[in-house]
């Protein structure tokens, strides 16, 4: 969500200085640089695999993910979670909780959610969990007993935006003026929604083996809650094996922060699958997204990756610069014959703009109308000076001459041919529909997809981390 962001930033009276030094993180020991970071794929965070995309021959979603939550039977609620959580609290996995209204986990408090717990979000009160700065969530499920946040509506009547979502707020840096922002989604703008600070290793807890289904309710027009929102969340936080499905807005959105994430699933959301803003500099590996051809953002456009540095000051620091490897995003277009029936608001596999930087490697993006769009001069300058990198990826899109785009009021490249030359020089491939169909087993099934590699897939080898 972009048209509301300029209205939600709180300029602090006290500015936060930009540090030139680095600080060890609590997740792997790699340095995080406050300011414009220089992390690369050559980091101990990344598992060295040979294949491109989020999967090799093993389906890491098996047993805990759910691609058809619309038709899943969930037990009725018999307990309620609401109001402020002011003391350390552990839920009871034998109960099914109605998540009612905005539930604030207050600073200094940990909310523990045991494996197998089910929480059903109330629509009328916009049920949402907000983990405030200084608070923690301990939501650690297992592959056999995932933690499930889902709609409280009956099977067959659920839809995107049935409840709010999960919001984590930390004290890691961002590039919002003054260093402090108020998260979007209608969170109390006086204190409870604040995020940002000077601690890149800040810890908001753990979310592991967690499903978030049918979130993304609109607090007001153009001010929706995402499935899982990160506001300046630090590297002390663990995010691994999380699925967001049927979100009414973005599946995942990062506003600044340094948090690293692995094994993320985005399924059938309305807006962007993965959205980066305000100086986010974390690392991601093994992430998959799948677009539903009939679900798209009618107020804007829906993209696989959408990345911005700042709406108004494209070169403000720290620059948005996620480092991503082994991502697979399946667009809404399963074939050329299906293109005409896809919602027209579906657009790019990747849209980088407003000065965003990025390191993106070893990834697969197929089935999109448009491919890679590098918008605005500041965004493209980062590619030519080497502080951004697009390397070793596979793309496939359908609209002629929009597979690679250099756009903006001042284009990022003087001609699209220069961008295409960069693209091919870094080992990236643009393939056709027939070749794309040889990569993955069953990526376009909306209820039982299989994103693993076909026998003989060209994506089975060639990944690089240098």
Image (cartoon, helix red, strand yellow):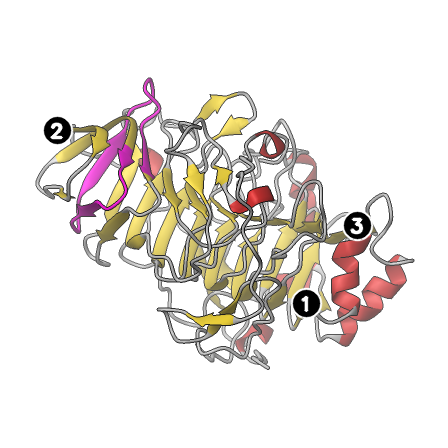
Q: Mark 1 touching mark 3, by CB under 8 A?
A: no
Relative to residue 431, is residue 89 drawn left or right?
left
> Which of 5/153 is in front?
5
Residue at 73%, 75% (x, y): give it. Answer: 426
Q: Which residue is mark 1?
A: 390
Give the mark, 2 or 3, whose residue is nearer the N terminus: 2
Range shown magenta: 104-130
- For label 2, the crowd category at 10 Å Cα-Cα, with few meaning under 14, some 14 to 19 and many 20 or more, is some
- Secondary element at image label 1: strand
State how far apart marks 2 and 3 are (Cα): 51 Å
Q: Position of residue 137 (x, y in %)?
A: 26, 48
- Label 1: how many residues lie within 10 Å, few (<14), some (14-19) or many (20+)? many
Q: Residue at x 47, y 43 (%)?
A: 251
For disc 2, the marked residue is 79
Which quadrant of the figure contains the C terminus? bottom right
Asked if the residue under mark 3 is in contact with the one under mark 2, i.e. CB atoms within 8 Å, the reply is no
């Amino acid at each position: 969500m972009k048209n509301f962001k300029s209205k939600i930033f709180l300029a602090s009276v006290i500015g936060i200085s930009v540090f030139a030094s680095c600080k060890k993180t609590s997740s792997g020991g790699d340095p995080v640089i406050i300011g414009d970071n220089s992390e690369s794929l050559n980091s101990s965070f990344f598992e060295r695999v040979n294949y491109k995309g989020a999967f090799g021959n093993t389906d890491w979603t098996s047993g805990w993910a759910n691609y058809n939550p619309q038709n899943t039977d969930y037990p009725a609620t018999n307990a309620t979670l609401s109001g402020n959580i002011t003391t350390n609290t552990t839920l009871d996995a034998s109960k099914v909780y109605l998540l009612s209204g905005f539930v604030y986990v207050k600073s200094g408090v940990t909310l523990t959610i045991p494996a197998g717990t089910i929480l059903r979000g109330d629509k009328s009160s916009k049920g949402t969990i907000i983990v405030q700065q200084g608070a923690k969530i301990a939501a650690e499920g297992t592959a056999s007993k995932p933690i499930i946040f889902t709609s409280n509506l009956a099977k067959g009547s659920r839809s995107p935006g049935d409840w709010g979502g999960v919001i984590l707020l930390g004290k890691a840096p961002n590039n919002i003026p003054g260093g402090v922002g108020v998260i979007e989604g209608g969170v109390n703008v006086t204190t409870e929604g604040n995020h940002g600070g000077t601690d890149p290793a800040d810890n908001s807890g753990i979310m592991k083996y967690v499903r978030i289904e049918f979130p993304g309710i609109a607090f007001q027009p153009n001010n929706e809650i995402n499935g899982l929102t990160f506001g300046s969340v630090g590297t002390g936080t663990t995010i691994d094996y999380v699925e967001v499905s049927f979100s009414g807005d973005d599946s995942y959105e990062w506003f600044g922060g340094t948090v690293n994430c692995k094994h993320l699933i985005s399924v059938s959301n309305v807006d962007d699958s993965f959205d980066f803003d305000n100086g986010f500099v974390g690392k991601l590996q093994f992430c998959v997204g799948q677009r539903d051809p009939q679900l798209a953002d009618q107020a804007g456009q829906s993209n696989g990756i959408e990345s911005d540095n700042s709406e108004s000051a494209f070169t403000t620091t720290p620059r948005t610069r996620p480092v991503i490897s082994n991502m697979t995003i399946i667009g809404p277009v399963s074939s050329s014959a299906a293109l005409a029936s896809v919602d027209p608001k579906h657009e790019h596999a990747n849209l980088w703009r407003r000065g965003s930087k990025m390191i993106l490697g070893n990834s697969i993006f197929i089935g999109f109308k448009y491919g890679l769009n590098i918008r605005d001069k500041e965004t493209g300058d980062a590619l030519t000076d080497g502080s951004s990198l697009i390397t070793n990826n596979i793309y496939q899109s359908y609209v002629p001459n929009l597979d690679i785009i250099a756009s903006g009021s001042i284009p990022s490249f003087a001609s699209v041919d220069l961008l295409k030359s960069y693209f091919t020089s870094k080992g990236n491939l643009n393939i056709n529909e027939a070749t794309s169909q040889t990569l993955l087993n069953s990526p376009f099934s909306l209820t039982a997809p299989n994103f693993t590699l076909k026998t003989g897939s060209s994506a089975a080898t060639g990944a690089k981390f240098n």
